[in-house]
Image (tube, coloured by chain):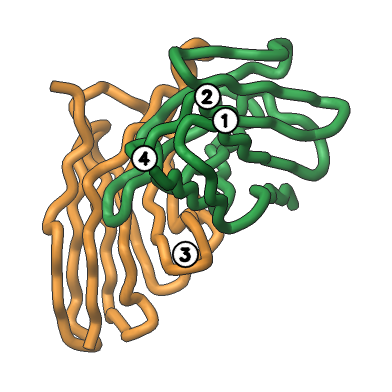
Chain colours: A orange, B green
Amino acid sequence: EAQVTQNPRYLITVTGKKLTVTCSQNMNHEYMSWYRQDPGLGLRQIYYSMNVEVTDKGDVPEGYKVSRKEKRNFPLILESPSPNQTSLYFCASSFHRDSRNTEAFFGQGTRLTVV
Amino acid sequence: SQKIEQNSEALNIQEGKTATLTCNYTNYSPAYLQWYRQDPGRGPVFLLLIRENEKEKRKERLKVTFDTTLKQSLFHITASQPADSATYLCALQYSSASKIIFGSGTRLSIRP
């Protein structure tokens, strides 16, 4: 089954404790992206990657890191989480050189609480 | 920078009526315009894509139009049902190799 898998689904952590949210897709998509979603603010892009070893900042990259060492994986790293990073996070992937098929597939979401 | 506006934050309509959601954008027209459905706490799910050279696209009870002169897309759900209640997101893409930009969404409620 084609899917984007994020882990964990729920996470409560303390300020300053480094954490990683994993994202994996099995559709051979070039493009992967991380979003955060907060009430009233919609989906805001954190980082995106057009292909392996190619990453770029989105609209709200501060406090986050990503890496793209393999095509299928795109982990989101919070080196020193703070309470303002409490949010619902989504990973997404899509084809990006196929003009017939550019829709994004989203993961189930990770609800992060930083206390 | 590109701005996307989706009509009201929330729209309430009677079951059986047609729901119409609006997506307006600024600056130049995208190559692709997409619509997604999102249920509370879940990831958005793709519904329809329309290209800049297409005026209209249909899928079952869904219809999307794209007017590059007005810089607007309309999303219609005909014969609406309570199960259609969700948040609907509009998204733009300027080429198949560029990132997808999402609007903030419209929360649609269909009352029985």
Circle 2: residue type:
Thr
- Distance between the alpha carbons at the discs numbered 1 and 2: 4 Å
Circle 1: residue type:
Thr
Q: Give the label, 3 or 4, closer to the camera.
A: 4
Name the residue rendered at 33%, 47% in the picture: B39
Residue B108 seen in render: yes
Residue A53 seen in render: no
For label 3, the residue is: A61
Name the residue rendered at 70%, 29% in the picture: B30
Determine whether the residue tagged by mark 3 lies in a helix, strand or loop: loop
Determine whether the residue tagged by mark 2 lies in a helix, strand or loop: loop
Return the disc, 1 or 4, that comes first in the chain's sequence.
1
Q: Which mark is residue B78?
A: 2
Check contact, mark 3 vs mark 4: CB within 8 A: no
Check contact, mark 1 vs mark 2: CB within 8 A: yes
Determine whether the residue tagged by mark 1 lies in a helix, strand or loop: loop
Percent of width and height locating residue A55 = 43, 46
Residue that extends furthest to the right in the rendered view of this protein: B69
Residue nearest the viewer, comparing A70 with A22? A22
- Distance between the alpha carbons at the discs numbered 3 and 4: 37 Å
- Distance between the alpha carbons at the discs numbered 2 and 3: 39 Å
Within-10-Å neighbours for mark 1: few <14, some 14–19, many 20+? some
Q: Is residue B76 left or right of residue A31?
A: right
For label 1, the residue is: B18
Circle 3: residue type:
Pro
**Quarter of the rendering occupied by the N terminus of chain A:** top left
For label 4, the residue is: B82
Q: What chain does badge 3 belong to?
A: A
Within-10-Å neighbours for mark 2: few <14, some 14–19, many 20+? some
- Distance between the alpha carbons at the discs numbered 1 and 3: 39 Å
Circle 4: residue type:
Pro
State whether residue B19 is above or below residue A37: above
